[in-house]
Every structure is written in C-alpha cells, then in structure tokens.
Image: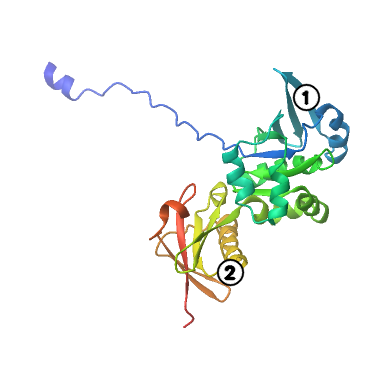
Amino acid sequence: MGFFKRLFQKPAAVAVPEPVPAPLTREGIVLLFDAPPDLMRGMLQLRHLLPGLNVELDRVDGTELGTYRFGPHQIRAFGIPAPLPRDFQQRTIHFSHWPQSVKDGLYHHRAHLVCTYEGNREDAREQLLALYQLAAAFSNLGLLAVADETAFNVTPVNVLQEVFSTLKVQDLQEDFPVMLWTNLLKFHKPDGSIWYASRGFERFGSPNFALLGQPGEGQQAFDVLGALLKYVVYYGAQLEAGHTAQLGSLQLRFAEPYEYAEHLTGKGKLLVVEILPEQ
C-alpha cells in the first residue's frame, strides 16, 4: 500500500513565478545645436513655455545633465559638446527629405543634447509629444533641429516651431504628426522604379510597409502608408500577408517582401503593400 499511496499522493505545491512585465519602451530624440546650450540660463524661458515645469540640473565630469518634469512626464537630458557620430548622422540627416542646403547646415552642428523619456506613460505618442514639446521650448536657445534615429528623420527648428505654433497639444494628441515621427526611405531599382519603405512605424505597434512605385510618387506613397499606420493605431487593425483593405478608392493587398528584403525591412515586421487594379 505504501507504493500506491506514494503513486497517487497529491504532489507538493510548486511555486509559479509571476510573469515578468515587458520593459517600458523609452522613446528618445537628440537636439542639435551650434554650441552647447546653457541649461541654467534657459530655465526661465523653458518654464515660461512649459507651465509647471520643474528642472533639476547637475554636472558630472564636465557634462551638463538635466531632468525636466511637467505634467505626468519626466525627461532626462545630457549635453555633449561634439557633433553626432557619423553613422547617427547618416540615419537621420542623410535620410531626411529636406533640401540639400538645409542638410548641409545641419551637418555643421557642433553640440547635441540627448533626451530620453523617463516618465510613466507607455503610449509612444504621449512620450514623443512630451519630447517634442521640450524640444520646441529650446527653439530660442540655439536649437538647429531634432534628430530622431528611430524615424530615420530630422526636423529643422523652423518646422518644429511652425507645428507647435499652429497646432495645439490637443490637436497633436488627436491626430499625431506622422511626418515628424516617421519617415519614408527610397530604394531605386535598375528598371527605374522605386521601393518606398517606411521607418518608425514599429514604435506605434504597427508593421512597417513598403510600396513599389515610380519616381515622383513619394508623397502618394507616404499618404497611403501613413493612412495605414493610423488605421492600425486608431482601430487596432491586425494586418498580415494575404489580407486586403479598402483605402478610399484604393483596393490594397498585403504580402511578404519578395525582393530586397534586407534593405526594405527596418525594425519589426514588414509588409509589402500592393495596389490592386480597379475592377
């Protein structure tokens, strides 16, 4: 009986570990300057532009550090009295679509301020809006542009000022500025056609997309892919290869990348968008 008793004995309770929550993704941007900004002198202006702003400044090994708190947000910034590394410039300034004269001016920056979101907001849109609000507050402190490596993009200060002077924060919360927080890269094929591939969509929980088109169709491609991004963000759409979608008068089909996958694919999943002929 001892054997059978042991055989059918209720096993001892086993401790099941609690699931480990996924780490909070921290968005970040880099502010470009002609010279290192004086964070102490800039505090008054920043507080005027961001009501309720609380600032803590420190200096470690000759580097200025700042912690900026406003509303539910906290942003950590540290200044570096040197240009961005060349590979970072390649992934931001080079791939942006501004005129070459604008890019040349940005290549000559001499200092940068690395800003990282450290608040408790999980939504990338809220994090980015807070980061770009802080960047806009630096506009009159010698800011040249905002470099966003995730988006493969850079935003000159005059564009940043225009966005935040013509649109309220509530507007930007309701209809987030895709043109600032993402980008569209071009990959030219030998036959003259162009692959247009998005960057930065993954930060919003969306696949990146690629669309094959012709020269001069970049704006149309950006409009289509940007609309798909908002479709995913606002409606929680789950798009996969083989799915179809109706976008205005366009009938779309999604597929796996079948060529140049190593070039078209950024971070996360990539779907090729095919525009089907009208019936």
Q: Can residue 176 be seen in this snapshot? A: no
Q: Can residue 249 be seen in this snapshot? A: yes
Distance between mark 2 and mark 1 Cα atoms: 47 Å
**What residue is disc 2 on?**
217
**What residue is disc 1 on?**
56
Left or right of 111, for residue 215: left
- Viewer-proximal residue, 12 or 246? 246
Mark nearer the N terminus (2 vs 1): 1
Residue 204 appears at what percent x and percent y? 57, 49
Residue 94 appears at what percent x and percent y? 61, 49
| Circle 1 residues within 10 Å: few <14, some 14–19, many ≥20 | few
Residue 72 appears at what percent x and percent y? 72, 36
The image quadrant where one finds the N terminus is: top left
Q: Residue at x 80, y 50 (%)?
A: 161
- Viewer-proximal residue, 12 or 235? 235
Residue 128 appears at what percent x and percent y? 67, 44
Number of numbered callouts drawn: 2
- Viewer-proximal residue, 209 or 5? 209
> Please, what is the three-letter code of the amino acid marked with disc 1?
Glu
Q: Residue at x 67, y 34 (%)?
A: 114
Left or right of 226, for residue 6: left
| Circle 2 residues within 10 Å: few <14, some 14–19, many ≥20 | few
Left or right of 263, for residue 166: right
Secondary structure at badge 2 equals loop
- Residue 129 found in image quarter: top right
- Residue 75 found in image quarter: top right
Judge whether 79 appears above or below 247 on screen: above
> Please, what is the three-letter code of the amino acid marked with disc 2?
Glu
- Residue 58 found in image quarter: top right
